[in-house]
Amino acid sequence: MLPANVFVYYANYDTPMPAHIFSKLAAVLPEGLRTAIYRYRRWEDAHAALLGKHLLQYSLRRQQLPHTLKDIEYTTYRRPFIKGTPDFNITHSGNIVACAVAEKGRIGIDIEKPQLLPADDFRQQFSREEWNDISLDPAPPAVFYKYWTRKEAVLKAAGTGLNEELHLLNTTTDIIFYDQHTWQLQPISITPAYTCHLACSEMNITVSVQEVSTSELAAAVIL
């Protein structure tokens, strides 16, 4: 059986886009998405929301699908989906936003920019096996964020959000069973400064990672 393709598109936004480009990118979004973006106070959050939607639109064009962002619907847990298209999931942290698209099955992705933090405050969120590894980490907080992104990727793929008791979700193995499904976990290399993981319901996948510049996203709208 041929492997299922998973595409990860990401954008880096170290500095704010020129205001006129941001406005043009926002103007083509459905009204509800556009309004939500302008509610953000931090430019980083507004850019992440805006570029995440445009990465999704970019993936729809790459697949030559007739759907647009107007077709986005939401589950009861507010997980976005578009009927008739491959499953997708969006994540952001720091100055990077990424959109994962699965040719088959369900997909979840989470990216985090590790920073030192009082890990003990999160003890109850990890399984005993995960916490043992975190406690033995010779270069904290690397293992903490490894398991955190794995957990979030699974929860986002399943669509249950962070409402679950996280300590019951043990991600120390690459194949886990959760929410009546088997999930494969896989690290994604985007940049050394970030930790990123995928969770996919397909066991045989091929992952491709592609950076998409903000100028390329803007060109599709402005030209």
Image (tube, rainbow, N blue to C red):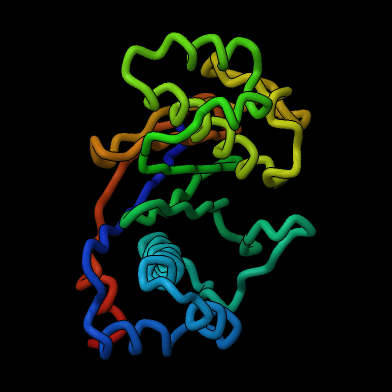
Q: Residue at x 61, y 42 (%)?
A: 157
Viewer-nearest residue: 149 or 180: 149
Q: Is residue 128 above or below residue 197?
A: above
Name the side, left or right, on which 216 lies relative to 60.
left
Q: Residue at x 38, y 34 (%)?
A: 116
Q: Quadrant of residue 113?
A: top left
How many marks do you count on the picture? Answer: 0
Q: Does residue 2 appear anywhere in the picture?
A: no
Where residue 72 appears, as percent x and y from the top left, is: 61, 70
Q: Residue at x 42, y 43 (%)?
A: 111
Q: Quadrant of residue 121?
A: top right
Where residue 115 appears, as percent x and y from the top left, is: 37, 38
Where residue 25 appears, as percent x and y from the top left, is: 36, 82
Viewer-nearest residue: 9 or 82: 9
Where residue 40 appears, as percent x and y from the top left, is: 49, 75
Viewer-nearest residue: 88 or 10: 10
Q: Is residue 100 above or below residue 83?
A: above
Name the side, left or right, on which 174 lies relative to 95.
right
Q: Is residue 156 above or below residue 28?
A: above
Quadrant the C terminus occupies: bottom left
Name the side, left or right, on which 91 lies relative to 25.
right
Q: Does residue 138 appear anywhere in the picture?
A: yes
Q: Residue at x 46, y 76 (%)?
A: 41
Q: Is residue 130 above or below residue 76?
A: above
